Image (tube, coloured by chain):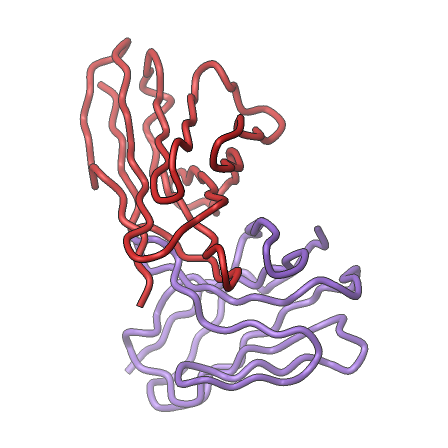
């Protein structure tokens, strides 16, 4: 079946550095991808909606200059956490909508730890 | 998107049916009811979705009330591996975003 893959699965970085997380739809084209963030023992919080070839739409309270989203192709979206701080440590999850079916598939998630 | 209300936690004995309720009293006509579950430190897993009619697949059944203001997810024979957080979500059409609530922590015990 359709698979959404995220890379890396986990990453540790120093405070002040930038980290890029990739989200790929492996066997289908995704015109829309969503990025979520999840803190321990909390639900998933939608950060932004990413449409291929256009600027991402961010949810209220999410800093677009800090969380850079690029959706350059129908199979790849990237989230870059710029100038990461310890409070950005979280589980980041992407999802993608199948272009033809509307089905929504989730990636395995990427755990970011900022020291 | 319509908001959903779920009990924070439920228990179920292994082999028994698990019935997880969800209220979505403000649902509108073109909004679907979706169920996902999340096992610790993994991405959410799709279970089932429906609009008006009851639905069944290899994982579960979804019962939607006639007025569509509530629904129940049924896992017919719960196993220990079904222990997870279950999210009931109302989605605007088949291409809308998913907004997660707090979900129900289902614990299946021996």
Nearer-the-camera pick, A78 or A111? A78
Say whether residue B21 is left or right of residue A98: right
Placement of the N terminus of chain A among the 4 image quadrants: bottom left
Tally the marks.
0
- Residue B49 spot, x, y in % from top left: 56, 72
Chain coloured purple in this rendering = B
Chain coloured red in this rendering = A
Work out whether A93 lies above or below A80: below
- Residue B56 spot, x, y in % from top left: 51, 86
Placement of the C terminus of chain A among the 4 image quadrants: top left
Say whether residue B101 is left or right of residue B43: right
- Picture quarter containing residue A70? top left
Work out whether A103 lies above or below A107: below
Nearer-the-camera pick, B30 or A91? B30
- Residue A92 spot, x, y in % from top left: 36, 38
- Picture quarter containing residue B90? bottom right
Question: What residue is rendered at 60% in x and 61% in y?
Answer: B94
Question: What residue is rendered at 61% in x and 52% in y?
Answer: B96
Say whether residue A103 is left or right of residue B95: left
- Residue B85 spot, x, y in % from top left: 43, 61
């Amino acid at each position: 079946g359709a698979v959404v893959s995220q890379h890396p699965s986990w990453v540790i970085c120093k405070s002040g550095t930038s980290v890029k997380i990739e989200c790929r739809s492996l066997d289908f084209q995704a015109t829309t991808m969503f990025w979520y963030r999840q803190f321990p023992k909390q639900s998933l919080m939608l950060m932004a909606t990413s449409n291929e070839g256009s600027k991402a739409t961010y949810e209220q309270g999410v800093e677009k200059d800090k969380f850079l989203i690029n959706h350059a192709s129908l199979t790849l979206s990237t989230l870059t956490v710029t100038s990461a701080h310890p409070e950005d440590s979280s589980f980041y999850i992407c999802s993608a909508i199948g272009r033809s079916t509307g089905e929504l598939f989730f990636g395995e998630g990427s755990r970011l730890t900022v020291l | 998107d319509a908001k959903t209300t779920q009990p924070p936690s439920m228990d179920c004995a292994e082999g028994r049916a698990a019935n997880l309720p969800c209220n979505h009293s403000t649902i509108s006509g073109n909004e679907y009811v979706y169920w996902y579950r999340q096992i610790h430190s993994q991405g959410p897993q799709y279970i089932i979705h429906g609009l008006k009619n009851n639905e069944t697949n290899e994982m579960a059944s979804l019962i939607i009330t006639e007025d569509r203001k509530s629904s129940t997810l049924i896992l017919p024979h719960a196993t220990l591996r079904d222990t997870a957080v279950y999210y009931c979500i109302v989605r605007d059409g088949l291409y809308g975003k998913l907004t997660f609530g707090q979900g129900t922590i289902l614990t299946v015990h021996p």
